[in-house]
Image (cartoon, grey):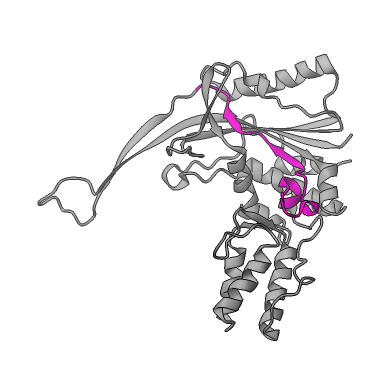
Amino acid sequence: MSTFIQLHLLTSYPPANLNRDDLGRPKTARMGGVDRLRVSSQSLKRTWRTSELFEDALVGHVGTRTKRLGTEVYEALTGAGIAEKKSLEWARAIANVFGKIQKSGTEIEQLAHLSPEERQGVDELVATLIQEQRAPTEDELKLLRKNPHAADIGLFGRMLAAHPAFNVEAACQVAHAITVHPVAVEDDYFTAVDDLNFGEEDMGAGHIGETGFAAGLFYSYVCINRDQLIDNLSGDVELADKAIAALTEAAVKVSPKGKQNSFGSRAYASYVLVEKGRQQPRSLSVAFLKPVYGQDQAGTAIKALEGQRESFEKVYGPCAEGHYVLNAVAGEGSLDELKAFLVQN
């Protein structure tokens, strides 16, 4: 059995629109018979993966997801004086290594996740082609790397339909965050004033708009398979532990970016429970199947979460070999101690 690290977080956001649906309103989900706010796992993973905190902690070990690799190669080739027709042909050949190319142009049809060493290989090949004024050979186009040293690819995986040997099985599962209580999405009707309209002829606003918002206390759940992550990173234990610590700190501190300039809804987690062990992992979302009501939502939610963990252990026995709690509502625990707990044997 693998070693699993499970994160249970409670994070409170003031009125905000953290993650929008196709109509621009906050995403929702129905659970326990009531409507909740929801932030998708896709939104959370990208928020954490692209945060300065995560990138600074793992500098040199963070990949790039893009459709534009071929376009960048094409621009580099033409910028160095290679004829447009040759540049297009060579750029398409290089980009096609990482994903199916659109019928025309240089874009890959789907986002491709490149590791730093794969991107370096592309850059070195482009430089060689420019210097030697020739097309890439078949051997030179073997740019994919097995189990690359990219922490984000190791954590969240990647799928290459045309080259399954270079797929990476995700070591980290992220649940959609949901509020522990019912919500009603409200509408903010707003106007913007034209600074040069002095009201002499027109007293109207320069712009009128409307946006949905709601406040909520979210439960988030993350499960990391540490052994899978070490395998994904070619056995690099030190890098795997750095990636786990960086992801944990990002999950605790970094908020989704949706409408941040309008709502300023940055928040740290108010409560973090970390469990570590070789038992089969489980979410504690059932603690909130019955929605939280009342004015002390944080206190009630913490009691519900801890009570559910204890109930699981009464029924199934210990569900982890150890746990650590950071409670920013009561001022108990510290992030440094939590990060130290993550790497203890």
Q: Where on the picture, by quarter, is residue 281?
A: top right
What residue lies at 61% left-to-right and 42% top-to-bottom? 42
Pick the front one: 214 or 1: 1
Q: Where on the picture, by quarter, is residue 134?
A: bottom right
Visible in this render: residue 63?
no
What residue lies at 68% left-to-right and 23% top-to-bottom? 305
> Left or right: 155 with respect to 200?
right
- Magenta highlight range: 153-182
Q: Position of residue 101 (x, y in %)?
A: 61, 60
Pick the front one: 83 or 265: 83
Pick the front one: 85 or 145: 85
Q: Position of residue 187 (x, y in %)?
A: 37, 32
> Left or right: 298 with respect to 278?
left
What residue lies at 64% left-to-right and 53% top-to-bottom? 53
Q: Is residue 175 covered in magenta?
A: yes
Q: Position of residue 199 (x, y in %)?
A: 14, 50
